Structures are given as structure tokens and as C-alpha cells.
Image (cartoon, rainbow, N blue to C red):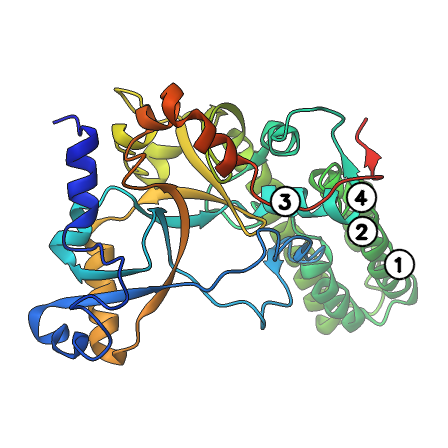
């Protein structure tokens, strides 16, 4: 059934919607929630919309993107598109709520976004979504495969060099030790969104030479320790090729970019993916976003609901029933409510995407879209 404005409003106000802090589900009255199978979430306090900008960094050795300096920012596990102060309900009512989503961070795109911010670069355009569009056009891997093999060879070659010291051969050991600063230098200069994918390619000649040096090293005394050291060093170098370069080749088909074709208030976007055609077959279905949110009758597997949450780019996925069950069990263990982020895209006056597009609602939509953002004045431009 396609939800109408009244049905969407009723659904959001039932079960899992408590807007008035003085309602019957107040703090002192929610003590019976666990016995009724219910649990609650508290809305995160107000923070600057760009509070986390510039905090995403990529480790050039492991290739992992992480957020730093988060001690002053609370954790959150849900994103709510409806306007409300807290969530109270059970698994059934939460499962029926179409405005609650699980945020899945797009780490490499967030890193690209934050790197532009730190470099003080912007896209010259009057479009307030120009920066987001630029980041979405970059071909990166958004699938949950970690660094996808793009980590530095130093991770395994450092052990390979240690193994080579067992040979006691000075030329072999000297060249092996010289590889460490070379790989560090390559990793540091390529640790930017534009070049990180070429780190292993630039290191390839040095790695091939290392294999040649190991294979041609003479065992003049016929030592077993020498042979063991050479074989172990070669084995580690081969593993690096398989787990690094091989994994990059296998995951190359997961590279993708996105086209932004619709914007909702408060930095929420609907995008279409280009590339990574078989991602759902490999990693499972990502869920369907309801028509009352998108305004579209069908939701293709290549579509994505994207939000910028305090500077982090996240994909908003519908919460599965087993995830609600897990949240209920966790609440029963701790009796401590988790935190959700409210984006206030929808409400009683604009209960669906069609209401936002209605000319009567246009002035309110403009107000929502023009909420305070970070200033890009006097910054550099992207070529």
C-alpha cells in the first residue's frame, strides 16, 4: 500500500513516536518498558552541522580510514528523518517505522570530503551540493572490503626483511633495509584521495627487484639457516603480491561512483550508483526505501539514500528486524538507551516527499535547506 500523507503521519506518531518530553512515556514511566518488550532511544543533543569535518584520516600503512578526535562527540546508531525528540516502542512498532535508518559510513568518500576541507579547496559553483557531487563522482570502493588490498607493502616486507637477516648476506640485508624508507616515502606521498590507489603500483619495481635479489643470493656455505631465511623472505613477498595486488585486482569490479539526482532538506540526497553491478549479489540486499520518503514508485538496487551527518557521509539503510531484536536485547542487558540523530526532514506538515515538493511547502523547504553550513569563503578551487 502506498502511504498517503495522513497514513505516513499516523504511522510515525504511533508506537515509536513520542514528541512531548512530558508525555506518558516520561523517564519515570519507562521503567516498565523492558517488561513490555519495549526499549527506547534518546535524541542526540544539538551539535554544529559540520562538527566532524576534517576528522577522517587514512592510515597509509594499513589503508584503513578512521575518524579521529571523537571524544567530544557521542556515538549514534540510528538516523531519524521524522521530527521527534525520542523513540519509544517495541520491535514490531520500530519495524513498521519507515523513517528510521541504520547509518553506514562511506569511509573513503568521507575521507575525500574531509581532505578537500583540510586542503581548503572547493568546486566553483553556485550549487550548494557541488562539493557532494564532486565527491560522489570519484570512483572508490564503498563495499565492506576494508582497504581492498590498497595497504602498503611495508606491512609484510618488514617481516620479509627480518627473515632475510638470517642469511647473513650483507648485500641482501642492506637492500632489504633500504626498502623500508622507500615504501614509507611512497605511502606518504600517495596518501591522498587522488593517488592512494597507485601506491602498490609505484612500489612494484622495488618489490620485483627484492625477489630477484633473494632468488640470486648465493649460499656459499650450504647453510640450512640461510636457505630457511631466503625461503621465508620469498614466501612473505609472494603473500604480499597475492593479498595486496591480487586483492586489488579482484576488488576492482567494486569501484563505483554516484549520480545525485534528487535533494531532500537537511543534506539528504537520493543517488544512483554507476559500477559495482554485482555488489548486492556478493554482500546482500541493502533494503528498500519507502515511497513516502523518495516520492518514487520503485526503488532500484542501484539507488542509495545518502545523508551528510555532521560532516560524515553515510548511506541510510532500512533497519532489519533482526537488528531491532539485537537492539532490544542490548537494552535489556544495560537498560541504557542508545542515541539517534534527528535530521527533521519530515514532520506533521510535510509527511512525505510529495509534500516537500508541493508549492505550498516550497518556502518551508527553502528554509530547511538553507540551515547554517560551514563557510567556504576565500578558499582554493578544484581543477
381, above or below 347, in the image? above
Q: Are marks 1 and 2 in contact (CB under 8 Å)?
A: yes
- Marked residue nearer the N-terminal end (1 or 4): 4
Give the number of the disc on residue 191: none
Give the side of residue 208 with respect to residue 309, left or right. right
Give the residue displayed 11% in from the left and 27% down from the top: 1
State how far apart marks 1 and 2 are (Cα).
Answer: 8 Å
State how far apart marks 3 and 4 are (Cα).
Answer: 15 Å
State how far apart marks 3 and 1 are (Cα).
Answer: 52 Å
Crowding around mark 1 (Cα neighbors within 10 Å: few <14, some 14 to 19, many 20+) is some
- Marked residue nearer the N-terminal end (3 or 2): 2
Q: Which quarter of the rendered picture does the C terminus lie within?
A: top right
* Residue position marked by numbered label 1 in the rendering: 175
Give the number of the disc on residue 210: 2
Q: Position of residue 300 (x, y in %)?
A: 33, 23
Give the residue displayed 15% in from the left and 57% down from the top: 91
Disc nearest the viewer among 3 and 4 = 3
Q: Nearer the viewer, residue 44 or 334?
A: 44
Q: Position of residue 175 (x, y in %)?
A: 89, 58
Give the side of residue 42 with respect to residue 127, left or right. left
Which residue is most to the left?
A: 36
* Residue position marked by numbered label 4 in the rendering: 120
* Residue position marked by numbered label 3 in the rendering: 373
Disc nearest the viewer among 1 and 4 = 4
- Marked residue nearer the N-terminal end (1 or 2): 1
Amino acid at each position: 500500500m502506498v502511504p498517503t500523507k495522513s497514513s505516513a503521519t499516523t504511522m510515525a506518531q504511533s508506537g515509536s513516536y513520542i514528541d512531548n518530553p512530558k508525555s506518558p512515556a516520561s523517564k519515570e514511566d519507562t521503567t516498565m518498558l523492558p517488561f513490555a518488550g519495549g526499549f527506547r532511544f534518546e535524541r542526540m543533543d544539538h551539535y554544529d552541522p559540520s562538527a566532524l569535518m576534517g576528522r577522517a584520516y587514512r592510515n597509509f600503512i594499513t589503508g584503513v580510514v578512521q575518524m579521529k578526535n571523537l571524544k567530544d562527540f557521542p556515538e549514534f546508531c540510528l538516523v531519524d528523518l521524522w521530527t521527534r525528540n525520542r523513540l519509544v516502542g517495541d520491535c514490531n512498532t520500530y519495524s513498521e517505522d519507515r523513517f528510521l535508518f541504520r547509518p553506514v559510513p562511506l569511509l573513503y568518500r568521507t575521507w575525500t570530503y574531509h581532505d578537500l576541507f583540510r586542503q581548503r579547496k572547493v568546486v566553483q559553483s553556485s550549487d550548494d551540493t557541488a562539493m557532494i557531487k564532486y565527491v560522489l563522482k570519484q570512483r572508490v570502493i564503498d563495499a565492506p572490503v576494508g582497504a581492498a588490498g590498497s595497504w602498503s607493502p611495508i606491512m609484510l616486507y618488514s617481516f620479509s626483511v627480518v627473515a632475510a637477516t638470517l642469511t647473513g648476506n650483507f648485500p641482501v640485508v642492506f637492500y632489504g633495509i633500504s626498502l623500508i624508507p622507500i615504501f614509507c616515502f611512497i605511502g606518504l606521498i600517495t596518501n591522498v584521495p587522488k593517488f592512494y590507489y597507485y601506491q602498490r603500483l609505484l612500489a612494484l619495481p622495488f618489490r620485483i627487484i627484492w625477489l630477484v635479489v633473494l632468488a640470486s643470493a648465493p649460499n656459499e656455505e650450504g647453510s640450512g639457516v640461510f636457505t630457511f631465511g631466503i625461503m621465508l623472505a620469498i614466501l612473505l613477498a609472494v603473500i604480499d603480491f597475492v593479498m595486496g595486488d591480487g586483492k586489488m585486482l579482484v576488488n576492482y569490479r567494486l569501484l563505483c561512483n554516484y549520480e545525485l539526482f534528487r535533494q531532500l532538506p537537511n543534506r539528504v540526497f537520493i543517488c544512483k550508483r554507476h559500477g559495482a553491478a554485482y555488489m548486492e549479489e556478493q554482500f546482500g540486499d541493502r533494503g528498500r526505501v519507502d515511497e513516502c520518503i523518495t516520492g518514487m514508485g520503485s526503488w532500484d538496487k542501484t539507488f542509495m539514500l545518502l545523508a551528510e551527518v555532521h560532516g560524515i557521509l553515510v548511506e541510510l539503510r532500512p533497519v532489519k528486524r533482526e537488528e531491532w531484536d539485537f537492539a532490544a536485547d542490548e537494552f535489556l542487558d544495560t537498560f541504557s538507551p542508545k542515541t539517534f540523530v534527528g535530521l527533521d526532514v519530515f514532520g506533521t506538515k510535510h509527511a512525505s516527499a510529495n509534500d516537500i515538493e508541493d508549492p505550498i511547502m516550497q518556502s518551508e523547504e527553502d528554509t530547511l535547506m538553507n540551515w547554517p553550513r560551514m563557510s567556504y569563503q576565500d578558499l582554493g578551487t578544484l581543477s
